[in-house]
Amino acid sequence: MTLSLAGVSRAFGGVRAVDDATFTVGDAEVHGLIGPNGAGKTTLLNLISGLLQPTSGRIELDGERIDRLPPHRVARKGVARTYQNIRLFAGLSAVDNVVVGEHQRRRAAFWRRLCLFPSARREEQAAREAAEALLARVGMRERAALPASSFSYGEQRRVEIARALASQPTLLLLDEPTAGMNPNEAAAVARLVREVAREGRTVLLIEHNVRLVMELCHHVTVLNFGKVIARGTPAGIAQDPAVIAAYLGEGP
Amino acid sequence: MSDLFLAYESLIAFVFINGLLALSVYATLSCGQLSLANAGFMAIGAYTGALITLRAPAVPFLAVLAASALLPAVVAVPLGLPVLRLRGVFLAIATVGFGEVVRLFFVNWDYTNGALGLVAIPQRTHLWTLVVVLALSLYLFGRLRGSRTGYALEAIREDETAARTMGIHTTAHKLSMLVLGAALAGLAGSLEAHHTFIVSPAGFGFGRVVDMLVQAVVGGTAAFYGPVVGAAFLTVLPELLRELGARLGLAPGPFRLFLNGAILLVVILYLPNGLVSLPARLRRRAREAA
């Protein structure tokens, strides 16, 4: 799935949180989105997932415009995401969270369940098993039945990633997936992201851990004050004077 | 035994009617929406049923009930589309407004005798009718739980934004539950009208929807049967304690309100998940003691 943004802007009052952003994320690519705090990274993710509408510009998935669609329609195009401040369903167990994530690829037909058809039961069993398999993938299989609110920060992030993968997305948006994780957990997430990309899914991730970005991403886009200030390979970005200035400040 | 049954038949009927009404409020609560329009929907259902029975007695009761559920359900759609954009207390206020509009409409409608209402409605509601309707409604909610739709409703209740980005059409789900609640409230209204012989606007005021809500909360909204348990408890208890109220010098009406308030307070403070969470809580306490 190719994601392309052309001249995307979003203003909040007089503040241009995202200002004329143009870049492309190639198919099955791991693309890093970095920048100082307040650069507009999360706003950009909200624009892609349909939670916000751009003030101007176009967002396209494989050439199809998605920037005027409501979030649930964007999700049905194959976009899934996680959140910087973790939005698990706190009252539900880990496995139930992931089952909800399967929503759009499951077949509904509530009447079959109402009439106690065995096919409905089988479908539910399959949904649950798929959810458990995903939890195993993020190392949370043993804790599947526990409520999401009982998990540590890192565990919650892993369940949230499993929930996002449950829809079998073609574009996965990760907002600081390793924040609050220890180095082992972060390395496990990095492995998972690489696997996901190998399955042919496109990944766009916001990440502050520079080493992780360097290792993981094929391409990186750098935002500052809502503007794209650099695009390229991780190695190229690291040499870019504009990026260095944005992160370290201008020299005297 | 049969004497006892006859003496309490009306009370038992109200256990079922109130159970249905508490379920109708639970419908929207189950996806996190506090809608207080149900006294209005109930009124629409009650008047629809009573008018058909009075004007066209040949219409079978099943068809009367179907119409009493359908009309409020249809009204719920144009109401829901704008008001379900509102959240929390704003939704509650807007729906209270709807309930009052419906009540005032019937107060001023000459065709239904205004504030006096309709009287001498033939009794067509039997106890078994109520048992069947409540059982079917409970079955519906029981099957909803654990289904794809049921999961979507829980997701909306927990975090609407996250639910939306997972492909859940939140407006459609919320509207469906509002419509379902309206249908159940209308059904309950019609069943009540055909049980008590009369329909008047006074029976559908703000107090009525507060009763439904209190019953649902006291019973517990974490389980679909909680509201029915709460309705049964709060319908029967004032009758059992009627003697006590009389000794305290309180008339049955005020005494019931006092009891409702006191029980609600106790439940919210000490049993926030309602009466149905009591067994699990006692078990846990016993385990901890052992």
Image (cartoon, coloured by chain):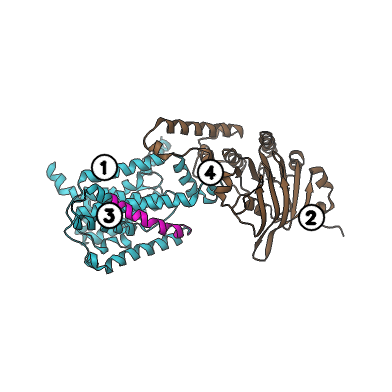
Chain colours: A brown, B cyan
Disc 1 marks which residue? B132
From the top left corner, tell me how far across and down residue A5 is, in percent.
69, 51
Q: Chain of mark 2?
A: A
- Looking at the figure, which quarter contains the N terminus of chain A? top right
**Is B121 colored magenta in this rendering?**
no
Element class at badge 4: helix
The answer to whether residue A208 of the structure is visible from this angle is no
Q: What is the CA distance from the residue labelled 3 to the residue labelled 4? A: 40 Å
Q: Amino acid at mark 3?
A: Gly
* Residue B17 appears in the figure: yes
Q: Is residue A83 left or right of residue B57?
A: right
Report which residue position mark 4 lands on: A149
Residue picked out by circle 2: A246
Name the residue nearer the viewer: A143 or A17: A17
B75 in the magenta segment:
yes
Gap between marks 3 and 2, in whole Å?
66 Å
As measured in the structure, the alpha-carbon distance from the residue carrying label 1 to the one carrying label 4 is 39 Å
N-terminal label among 3 and 1: 1
Work out whether disc 3 and disc 1 sit on a shared chain: yes
Q: Nearer the viewer, residue B263 or B217?
A: B217
Q: Residues within 10 Å of mark 3 (few under 14, many from 20)?
A: many
Q: Chain under label 4?
A: A
Of the two numbered discs 4 and 2 in the rendering, the one whose residue sits closer to the viewer: 2
Q: Secondary structure at mark 1?
A: helix
